[in-house]
C-alpha cells in the first residue's frame, strides 16, 4: 500500500510525507514531549508549537476550559522564540526521520518574514506553517487570516523570505474562507491547512466572570469537526493546492472523512490530550481501512467524496 503524499509539488525542496498523518500545532509541543509514549518517527510529519520572534509567556491563567465535546484554550502563543528553537530543537529534529514543520506567528508582516528568513536552510526543519489564524493574540494572528488581502500579503512576504515549503493555516473566524484560500494560493502558498480554532467563551456563573483569563479562547475537539469538514470541502473546491485538514479528528474514520472531502493530509490535535497515541491510532486505522477496502494508494481516497 502507498500512503505517501507530496504536499509541496511546486516547491524546489518538496514536502514528501511517508503517510498523511500529522500532529496539529500547539497540541504536540516540540515532538520531544511525546517521544516516550510511542514511536513518533512513524508519523507523516510533526508540526511544532507556534514560534514567534521573541519568547512569549502567553496569556493569564486560566487558559484551558473543557466544554461539551471540546476544549477552549487561550494559551496566547507561549513559546521559546525562534532563536532558542534553532539552537535547542532543530539539532534534535535533524536526527529524526519524521519531517518537522515549524508553525510561525507574528504581530506584523515584517515579523513573519523575519522568522521565515531565520528558519531558511536550518537543518531539521522541513517546512513552515504560517499561522494567520490564532484567535488568542492581541495584535496580528487571526486578524491577518480574516481578510483575503492581508492573508495574501503575509503569504507573499513569507514566500519571499524563505525557500522552504510554505503551508498557510486558515482561520474559520471569517465570512468566506474559500476567498481567503484563493488569495493565499495566488500569493504563492505551497499548501493550505485548515482549520484553526473557532472563537468562543465560557462564563463562570458563581464568579459572574468569564472563566478564561483572556475572556475569549479558541474552541477545538470533536465539537468543531462538522464545521471543519465543511470548510475543507469548500476550500478543496476552490483551490488546486494540497490541503491539510484539521479540526476534531479523533479516529481514523474522522481522518478518512477529511481525506474524502479533499484533504491530502490531516492533523490530529486535541485528541492527543486524552490519548497521546491518537495520531498513531489514526494512522493504523487508515491502514486497516485501506486493507479492508482493497485501496492500494491513498490517492484513491483523496477527494473521493467530490467525484
Ligand atoms: C492548547 C492548544 C494550543 C494550540 N496552539 C496552536 C498554535 O500554537 N498554532 C496553531 O496554528 N494552532 C494552534 N492550535 C490549534 C490546533 O493546531 C488546531 O488547529 C485546532 O485545535 C483544531 O484541531 P483539533 O480539534 O484536532 O484540536 C492550538 C490548539 C490547542 C487546543
Image (cartoon, rainbow, N blue to C red):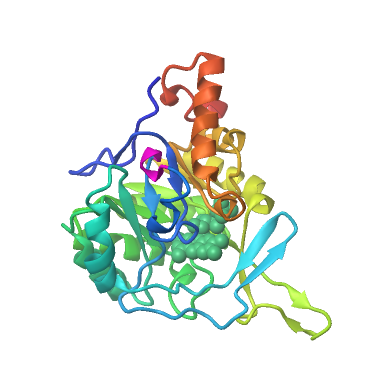
Q: At 45% from the left edge and 44% from the top edge, which residue is drawn?
A: 38
Q: At 72% from the left edge and 62% from the top edge, which residue is drawn?
A: 67
- Extreme residue in the top direction: 294
For the residue pair 61 and 168, the one nearer the viewer reads as 61
The segment highlighted magenta reads 39-43
For the residue pair 187 and 293, the one nearer the viewer reads as 293
**Image position of 62 with respect to 89: above or below:** below
Total count of labels: 0
**Image position of 134 with respect to 306: above or below:** below
Task: Tell whether 134 sits left or right of 252.
Answer: left
Does the segment drawn in magenta span residue 51? no
Q: Quadrant of the N terminus?
A: top left
Q: Position of residue 162 (x, y in %)?
A: 20, 59
Task: Tell whether 197 sits left or right of 26.
Answer: right
Q: At 59% from the left edge and 49% from the top edge, which residue is drawn?
A: 275
For the residue pair 217 and 62, the one nearer the viewer reads as 62
For the residue pair 42 and 161, the one nearer the viewer reads as 42
**Image position of 163 with respect to 84: above or below:** above
Q: Is residue 146 visible?
A: no
Q: Position of residue 79 (x, y in %)?
A: 40, 72
Dominant secondary structure of the magenta stretch?
Answer: helix
- Extreme residue in the right direction: 206
Amino acid at each position: 500500500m502507498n500512503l505517501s503524499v507530496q504536499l509541496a509539488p511546486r516547491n524546489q525542496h518538496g514536502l514528501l510525507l511517508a503517510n498523511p498523518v500529522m500532529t496539529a500545532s500547539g497540541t504536540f509541543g516540540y515532538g520531544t514531549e511525546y517521544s516516550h509514549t510511542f514511536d513518533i518517527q512513524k508519523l507523516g510529519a510533526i508540526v511544532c508549537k507556534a514560534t514567534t520572534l521573541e519568547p512569549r509567556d502567553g496569556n493569564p491563567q486560566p487558559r484551558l476550559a473543557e466544554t461539551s465535546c471540546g476544549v477552549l484554550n487561550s494559551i496566547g502563543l507561549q513559546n521559546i522564540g525562534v532563536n532558542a528553537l534553532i539552537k535547542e530543537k532543530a539539532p534534535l529534529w535533524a536526527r529524526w526521520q519524521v519531517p518537522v514543520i515549524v508553525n510561525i506567528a507574528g504581530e506584523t508582516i515584517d515579523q513573519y518574514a523575519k522568522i521565515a528568513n531565520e528558519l531558511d536552510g536550518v537543518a531539521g526543519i522541513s517546512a513552515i506553517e504560517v499561522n494567520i489564524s490564532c484567535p488568542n493574540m492581541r495584535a496580528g494572528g487571526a486578524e491577518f487570516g480574516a481578510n483575503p488581502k492581508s492573508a495574501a500579503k503575509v503569504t507573499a512576504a513569507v514566500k519571499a523570505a524563505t525557500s522552504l515549503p510554505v503551508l498557510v493555516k486558515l482561520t474559520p473566524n471569517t465570512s468566506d474562507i474559500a476567498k481567503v484560500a484563493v488569495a493565499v494560493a495566488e500569493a504563492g502558498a505551497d499548501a493550505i491547512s485548515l482549520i484553526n480554532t473557532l472563537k468562543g467563551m465560557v462564563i463562570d456563573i458563581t464568579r459572574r466572570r468569564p472563566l478564561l483569563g483572556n475572556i475569549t479562547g479558541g474552541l477545538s475537539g470533536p465539537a468543531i469537526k462538522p464545521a471543519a469538514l465543511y470548510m475543507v470541502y469548500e476550500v478543496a473546491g476552490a483551490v488546486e493546492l494540497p490541503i491539510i485538514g484539521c479540526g476534531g479528528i479523533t479516529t481514523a474514520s474522522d481522518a478518512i472523512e477529511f481525506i474524502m472531502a479533499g484533504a491530502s493530509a490531516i492533523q490530529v490535535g486535541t485528541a492527543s490530550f486524552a490519548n497521546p497515541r491518537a495520531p498513531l491510532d489514526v494512522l493504523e486505522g487508515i491502514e486497516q481501512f485501506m486493507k479492508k477496502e482493497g485501496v492500494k494508494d491513498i490517492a484513491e481516497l483523496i477527494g473521493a467524496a467530490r467525484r
